[in-house]
Image (cartoon, grey):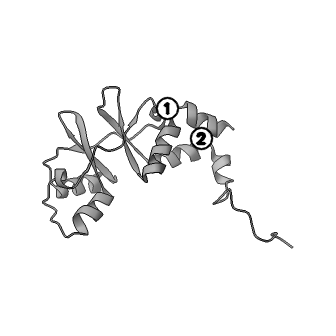
Amino acid sequence: MELARNLLVESVDRLSPASPLSLGPDASVRDAVELMRRHRIGCVLVCQAGLLLGIFTERDLLRRVLAPGRPLSLSLEECMTTEPVVVHRTESINSAIRRMEEGGYRHLPVVDGAGRPVGVLSVKRIVQYLVEHFPSTVHCLPPDPQAYPRRPEGA
């Protein structure tokens, strides 16, 4: 199948990951939320001197700030996800999908050979790629390809 082959052969770079938006670890949650709102994105990378320290996502906002009633003046360093799982730009799309599925992530930082962030890959971007490149395959799939009807359909 062409889809399976492409996912194994094509690199993450082929997905055109979004340019990373980042803030320093001392920036406030309020700053991160404003940046995410303004750019309509679901995460901000937390970087210092060009190195990835962590990621702050909508889930972090809900679980680590709002749910416990912490203030928006909190620094990102206090509530970010440290040492996030990353994908290298030269790795296969399949590798990225596997990491996202295993960890339950919606966003993965994309790094270069030196480990510097060069993009952010989202589930939304992967789905767009699949629909753009394999429309007949994607549109013809049942919700659960392994499920079989209990009774025959039709008359």
Whether residue 46 sits left or right of residue 149 in the image: it is left
Q: Residue at x 46, y 41 (%)?
A: 96
- Report the residue marked by disc 1: 11
**Residues packed near mark 1 inside 10 Å, few (<14), some (14 to 19) or many (20 plus):** some
Q: Residue at x 45, y 44 (%)?
A: 99
Q: Nearer the viewer, residue 40 or 45?
A: 45
Whether residue 9 sits left or right of residue 82 in the image: it is right
- Report the residue marked by disc 2: 133
Q: Residue at x 59, y 34 (%)?
A: 6
Badge 2 amino acid? His
Whether residue 36 sits left or right of residue 12 in the image: it is left
Disc 2/disc 1 C-alpha distance (Å): 14 Å
Image coordinates for residue 90, horizontal then vertical, percent = 44, 29
Find numbered disc 1 in the image and state the secondary structure of the residue it sits on. Answer: loop
Image coordinates for residue 59, horizontal then vertical, percent = 32, 59
Quadrant occupied by the N terminus: top right
Image coordinates for residue 52, horizontal then vertical, percent = 25, 38
What number is the disc on residue 57? Answer: none
Q: Nearer the viewer, residue 8 or 134?
A: 8
